[in-house]
Image (cartoon, helix red, strand yellow):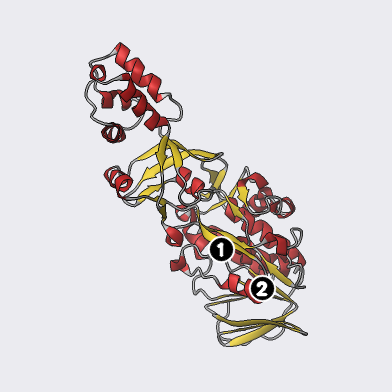
Amino acid sequence: MRADVDVADVDVIIIGAGAAGLMCASTAGFRGRRVLLVDHATKLAEKIRISGGGRCNFTNLHTAPEAFLSANPHFCKSALSQYSQHDFIALVERHKIAYHEKKLGQLFCDGSAQNIIDMLVRECDQAGVDLHIGRKIHAVDKREDGFHVRFDNGSARAQSLVVATGGLSIPKIGATGFGYEIARQFGLKLRTQRPGLVPLVFDQDVLSRCKTLSGLSVEAEVNYRTTAFAEGLLFTHRGLSGPSILQISSYWQEAKPVSVDLAPQHDATAHLLGGKASQPKADVANCLAELVPKRLAVELCALAGEAGRLADRSDKYLRRLGQMVNDWQLLPSGTEGYRTAEVTLGGVDTDELSSKTMQVKSVDGLYFIGEVVDVTGHLGGYNFQWAWSSGYVAGQNA
């Protein structure tokens, strides 16, 4: 890494030294390209470092196009086939990084996310990449002799420019909309950006119950229209989080309800009515607590109306309570926003790009990769795989 020298002519300039940028840089470098990788952040690849609780969920064994959202669901297919999860796993194994599958195909480092960062930097070093961090980009333009990039203490010129600036999520680690600005500068269409894989927040009535249950986690199935995710759900003092909620947030549209099944393996109505027949003197909350945690059972009973003994409650009440367990209709008031969102939905319209090379169709030598593009993966390592795949493809062509 260098921080105080001017740079003249290179073959490829990559803006953004995150997951996609690092992968692209080493790939292009190993092709014999002279590569300059520049980033405004002073700490390298912070999003990798903080991911997966510090252990980096670096890919998913089940990566497939169906796990990605885009206005064009077919766009990601070429990149994912050119550089698959198995290719990245082979790279990890070549660097002797120990890893494990946590669940649902999610692969994590046994040690630290820093292992992945160190691996990518090593690859860049071996490929002869010139890496500059802590350099704010002041201007980007295309002239007859190539792309010119002006940044702190220097400038560079190259025939190819790759934009790997990420999205708007988690601004405290340096996320900006700079990549979208470059896209607009070159007249490219953008899909509306919004936070994805983000906790949902609610108005006061639901929020007060979430606060009461804060810290409680349950296995739940969350549905929105025709999409459903069955994973953990976490009550927080701000609303609802956990994998199932984060997943559905990428699909949720404002002013629309989501349905939460708090006991997806059980018919709560049948359980309650059966309990009334077999043990009528039992407390309703205790009967329900056989399906969900006691704190949650008590709160649901309060929400449905006064509880008490099963024998004293009407079948109508028990059916209403059962439906609330299996089909709790909730209307989010919004999300926690980019502050906690893991990804940014939307971005550079894929119609503007070649799916085979990631190059802009209308501007020779200009590429967009990673999160800045309108391709967003599910939770569980898919977004990193998109970074590796799109970065590799651009690196093979820039």
Q: Can residue 283 be seen in this view?
A: yes
The answer to which quarter of the image holds residue 282 is top left
Q: Earlier in the sequence, mark 2 or mark 1?
A: 1
Horizontal placement of 154 versus 334: left or right? Answer: right
Q: Mark 1 points at which residue?
A: 118
For the residue labelled by badge 2, is the local secondary structure a helix, a strand or a loop?
A: loop
For the residue labelled by badge 1, is the local secondary structure a helix, a strand or a loop?
A: helix
Residue at (46, 61) in percent of width and height = 338
Q: In which quarter of the image is the N terminus?
A: bottom right
What's the residue type where badge 2 is placed?
Val
Circle number at residue 341:
none
Q: Name the residue under label 2.
A: 129
- Residue 271: x %, y % from top left: 37, 20
Q: Identify whether 123 is placed above or below 258.
A: below
Q: Can residue 119 be seen in this view?
A: no
What's the residue type where badge 1 is placed?
Asp
Residue at (36, 24) in percent of width and height = 319
In space, the residues marked 2 and 1 are separated at their CA atoms by: 14 Å
Q: Identify whether 99 is placed above or below 301.
A: below
129 and 326: which is toward the camera: 326
- Residue 322: x %, y % from top left: 37, 27
- Residue 158: x %, y % from top left: 72, 80
Horizontal placement of 374 versus 282: left or right? Answer: right
| Label 2 CA crowd tier, 10 Å (few <14, some 14–19, many 20+) | many
Q: Quadrant of the C terminus?
A: bottom right
Query: Residues at badges 2 and 1 in contact (C-beta under 8 Å)?
Result: no
- Residue 3: x %, y % from top left: 55, 82
Total number of numbered discs in the rendering: 2
Residue at (47, 52) in percent of width and height = 254
| Label 1 CA crowd tier, 10 Å (few <14, some 14–19, many 20+) | few
Q: Identify whether 20 is placed above or below 185.
A: above
